[in-house]
Image (cartoon, rainbow, N blue to C red):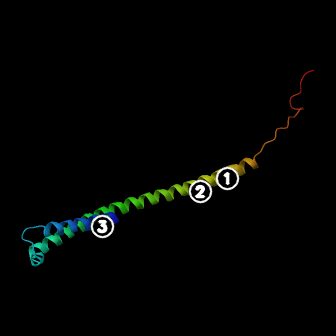
Amino acid sequence: MKNLTFIGFLLLGLAFLLYYLQPQFSAVKLFEPMTLMGILAGIGIGLIIGGIVGYASKGSAVRNEQKKQELKQLRRENEDLEKQAAELAKQQTVTYVPDENQNPQNY
């Protein structure tokens, strides 16, 4: 947005420079209705274009921030699930004790 403002002022300065370089330049003609209408129309068009570009860039920034928050939430949930799985694994440690009476071997 700052770059758009800079470019807008640069183009406005260029317009005044070109107006100044005209052979029949006078400060009085700068304030004639046709010249003022042209200046105001240029500013209006610039504001419209700047608003559209600003709206689009703001929307993409909001979407990117939302994706980052969702990713953080998924990472937290993943860590919680890993902790729960580790706790369950500790609780469910099975020790195998062979029972000799169940399957006697022949000698």
Label located before the other in sequence (1 or 3): 3
Camera sees residue 74: yes
Does dot 3 land on a helix, a strand or a loop? helix
Q: How far apart are labels 1 and 2 at the CA level?
A: 11 Å
Toward the viewer: 70 or 64? 64
Q: Quadrant of the N terminus?
A: bottom left
Which disc is residue 2 wearing?
Answer: none
Toward the viewer: 23 or 73? 23
Pinpoint residue 28: horizontal percent, then vertical percent.
10, 79
Which disc is residue 5 wearing?
Answer: 3
Report if the CB atoms under discs 1 and 2 are less than 8 Å apart: no
As shown in the figure, which amino acid type bears the numbered disc 2? Arg
Front tag of 3 and 2: 3
Other residues around mark 2 within 10 Å, as few (<14) / some (14–19) / many (≥20): few
Pinpoint residue 101: horizontal percent, then vertical percent.
90, 32
With 2 as the anchor, is 46 left or right in this view? left
Residue depicted at 89% across the width and 24% down the height? 105
Residue 74 occupies quadrant: bottom right
Residue depicted at 14% across the width and 70% down the height? 20
Residue depicted at 89% across the width and 27% down the height? 104
Residue depicted at 81% across the width and 41% down the height? 95
Other residues around mark 3 within 10 Å, as few (<14) / some (14–19) / many (≥20): few
Report if the CB atoms under discs 3 and 2 are less than 8 Å apart: no
Q: Which residue is mark 1?
A: 83
Pinpoint residue 60: horizontal percent, then vertical percent.
38, 58
Q: How far apart are labels 1 and 3 at the CA level?
A: 51 Å
Q: Indicate whether 63 appears above or below 104.
A: below
As shown in the figure, which amino acid type bears the numbered disc 3? Thr
Other residues around mark 1 within 10 Å, as few (<14) / some (14–19) / many (≥20): few
